[in-house]
Amino acid sequence: MKSSQPTGPVAPADATPPAAPLTRSDVLGIGALAARFGLAPHVLRHWESVGLLHPGRDAAGRRRYGADDLSRVAMILIAKRAGLGLDAIRSLSTSVDRAARRETLRPAAEELRSGIAAAQASLRLIEGRLNCEHEDVTRCPEYRRLVAEEIDSPTPAHRSARNDNSPATPPG
């Protein structure tokens, strides 16, 4: 007997259907390309001004984006989500040299590792407070240990590892 249950994920009734893939002959204007990625058109203009995009132009001088541009915008967004800045993205997109690529990516990888370690430490702190059985959290041995650690290590590097935006020492 066949089940009436769906066999795969079902999109909500109000879901927007995915955009059709561009063919080599398709071109988009700046507004359409920006909308496709949820960006403002000025973002694409900025990326062009820093050398990340090179759209063609029609007879009236309007930007025209094809399938290659669509792929490049997707690559830029992926790289930005990975924490890369526009300079690094430009360097990666123009270099075919493996050593240069490694030189560009190594600091980004280390920054991500540091951020992950800081996020894991923050999660442990929050989970510890959630699970603490002391009525007064200041009586918790783990809380006291963390406070003592903070007092003993008020270096700028320590603070930035915690993602604290306050200065290590008061200005003045």
Image (tube, rainbow, N blue to C red):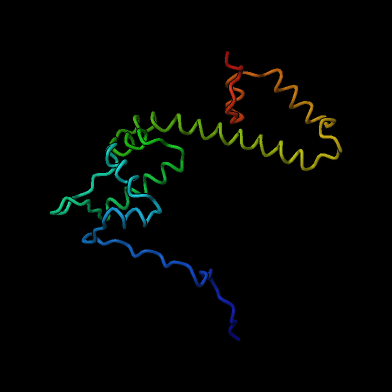
At x 56% / y 34%, what residue is drawn? 115
Q: Quadrant of residue 47?
A: top left
Is 170 left, or right, of 148 in this rendering? Answer: left
Residue 46 image offset from top left, x and y in percent: 31, 41
* Residue lying furthest front: 172
Residue 102 image offset from top left, x and y in percent: 39, 31
Residue 83 image offset from top left, x and y in percent: 46, 38
At x 15% / y 53%, what residue is drawn? 60
Q: Relative to residue 129, is residue 4 depicted above or below?
A: below
Is 53 left, or right, of 141 in this rendering? Answer: left
At x 54% / y 33%, what residue is drawn? 113
Quadrant of the snapshot with the C terminus = top right
Residue 9 image offset from top left, x and y in percent: 53, 68
Q: Quadrant of residue 140?
A: top right
Quadrant of the snapshot with the N terminus = bottom right
At x 39% / y 31%, what residue is drawn? 104
* Residue lying furthest left: 59
Number of disc labels: 0
* Residue lying furthest top: 172
Q: Relative to residue 142, is residue 47 depicted above or below?
A: below
Which of 92 and 35 lies nearest the eye of the viewer? Answer: 35
Is 121 left, or right, of 66 in this rendering? Answer: right
Q: Quadrant of residue 67?
A: bottom left
Q: Relative to residue 149, is residue 1 depicted above or below?
A: below
